[in-house]
Image (cartoon, helix red, strand yellow):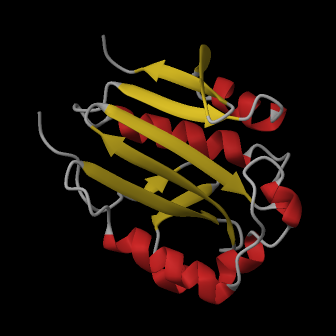
Amino acid sequence: MPEPPTSAPIIHTARLDALPLRVEHAQEMAQVLADPALHAFIGGRPATPDALRSRYERLVAGSPDPAVTWWNWVLRRREDGCLVGTVQATVTGDVAEIAWVLGTPWQGRGFAVEAVRGLVDRLGWQPRIRVVVAHIHPGHRASAAVAGAAGLTPTDRCQDGEVRWELSLRP
């Protein structure tokens, strides 16, 4: 099977453009992700622009493991050009593990569902990827709803207290 490309492809949805992450996104994304409530289920606290810049430098450089591909995107709302969140996929073998976060002001408007559906659709274009996985805290109903709307279903497996959700793309 062909290897997935190392750079994240642009993903277009009805209202969003998922753009490959760049270090320059750190300043605006620090504002998008500034609400401490975003960390209720994942822990930690909002990152400063400098801390986010350092993290983005590592992400943009790519995985140090040649068997793992990191794809990271920022979500830009086409209507006004502002960034509203992120989606990501870590591809190992035939599995893509995905995650997403949407800034508090843009939640409840269907952007997360739209972005994750676009991500899952794009991953389906990769012949190597057979399974999409997300790990979701059992109390995080909003993320569970997003995963379900994107076609993932919960399994009986847990990792670090989070439920594993899966979608088989190919038999």
Among the 4 quarters of the image, the one containing residue 104: bottom right
Q: Nearer the viewer, residue 156 or 169?
A: 156
Residue 127, given in percent of the width and then of the height, sits at 22, 31
Residue for point 56% across, 53% down: 87
Task: Judge from the rendering whether residue 141 lies leftward or rightward of residue 162; answer left or right.
Answer: right
Pick the quarter of the image with the N terminus: top left
Residue for point 69% across, 46% down: 112
Residue for point 57% across, 46% down: 99
Residue 14 in view, yes or no: no
Task: Judge from the rendering whether residue 112 lies leftward or rightward of residue 120; answer left or right.
Answer: right
Residue 129 in view, yes or no: yes
Residue 32's place in the image compared with 44, above or below, is below
Tell how many labels.
0
Q: Nearer the viewer, residue 14 or 93?
A: 93
Task: Judge from the rendering whether residue 74 lies leftward or rightward of residue 123; answer left or right.
Answer: right
Residue furthest to the front: 160
Residue 88, given in percent of the width and then of the height, sits at 50, 52
Among the 4 quarters of the image, the one containing residue 52: bottom right
Residue furthest to the left: 1
Residue 111, given in percent of the width and then of the height, sits at 71, 48
Q: Nearer the viewer, residue 76 or 94?
A: 94
Residue 146's place in the image compared with 152, above or below, is below
Residue for point 83% across, 51% down: 107
Residue 118, given in percent of the width and then of the height, sits at 52, 42
Residue 135's place in the image compared with 152, above or below, is below
